[in-house]
Image: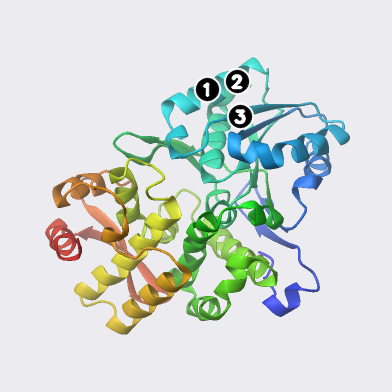
Amino acid sequence: MPATAASPAASTEAPRRTVHVDVAGRPYDIEIGPGLLREAGARVAALRPGARVAIVTDANVAAVHLATVEASLSAAGIENVAVVVAPGEKTKSYKGLEQVVEALIGARIERRDLVLALGGGVVGDLSGFAAAVLRRGVDVVQAPTTLLSQVDSSVGGKTGINSPQGKNLVGAFHQPVLVLADTAALDTLPAREVKAGYAEVVKYGLLGDAAFFDTLEKDWPGVIGGGPERIFAVAKSCEAKAAIVARDEKETGDRALLNLGHTFGHALEAGAGFSDRLLHGEAVSIGMALAFAFSRRLGLCPGQDVGRVERHLEAVGLPTRIADVPGELPDTDGLMRLIAQDKKVSRGALTFILVRGIGDAFVAKDVDGAEVRAFLDEVR
């Protein structure tokens, strides 16, 4: 069973948490707390004695955290090499994948070795996919350094890259063997990055845990600013995702609930050219607000819940409207084409994660495209 996150007050006594992900045949632990990057060597040595490690990171993260991880691995007697890629969503591409895979081959990383993904969601997704295809599968340790990656992308084994036609359309399920979520690393992030990651924290309350959303409404400044509220929120989010992944590893059922806000959000990301104009978490924030508003339009969700969600996201400083995205975006026809490329589309039928209220999301299949189009025309 996954570990149960303590209340924020109890977290001051024992700041670290372990959440177990019980995936059939490939269970692993998520370690959560400050200082874990300094312990990477000891953790890897205990997990895989004799393995060599390739650290994949981006230039921004390397400047802050790479030396710490290299020193930790070297102190544990672990031979290591670093592969540094350019920061940003555009690195999650065929070209970025080629760069990483060829560097790993050049470094003679073998099946018994490890890839250590050091960074945010882009690095985690790219590194995990590279590990999945290298020599038909090399194990990966995720060391997420952003709030978004700690609560979402580093957990559950989804890896991949973007296509010019849409986000995350090329990839593989490749579970990590360990996740080291060093919460102290979040203190080095710009406020915008932390707020973007917070959108994925809110998601867990909105999709299935109204009481968690209640807590976040009170405690969000502590989650954003650091402290016991942050560790509690990361652990609670990881518990929620671990439970869903254990039931549905490859998204044939209710794992799709984790995509609340993502169908609209991914279309907006692609429409913004996967650029810094719109971070992933910001796109998810808008997408969740749109999912609630669309559910209200369909007569599924009460208006007071829609307003409550919008007010909370705006209080944190997150966008909630398409008009909040700077610069030009595709028109409604263009957004509909991008939505039609969503991974949840099945034989042309649109699938959305809709809500009956806060904490009550469900998978809606065969959603009427005309309804979606009319809704987008209204809210643009």
| Percent coordinates x, y for residue 182 in the rendering | 70, 53
Q: Which residue is mark 2?
A: 103
Quarter of the image that includes the N terminus? bottom right
Residue 279 located left or right of residue 328:
right
Rendered location of residue 42, percent (x, y): 84, 43
Task: From the image, state whether disc 2 or disc 3 is nearer to you.
Answer: 3
Q: Amino acid at mark 1?
A: Gln
Judged left or right of residue 198, residue 327 is left
Mark found first going from the N terminus, 1 or 3:
3
Which residue bears the numbered disc 1? 99
Q: CA distance from mark 2 to mark 3?
A: 10 Å
Mark 3, residue position: 84
Q: Between residue 194 and residue 123, name the one nearer to us.
A: 194
The disc at residue 259 is: none
The crowding category of the residue bearing disc 3, from other C-alpha atoms within 10 Å (few below 14, some 14 to 19, many at least 20), is many
Residue contact between numbered discs 1 and 2, judged by CB atoms under 8 Å: yes
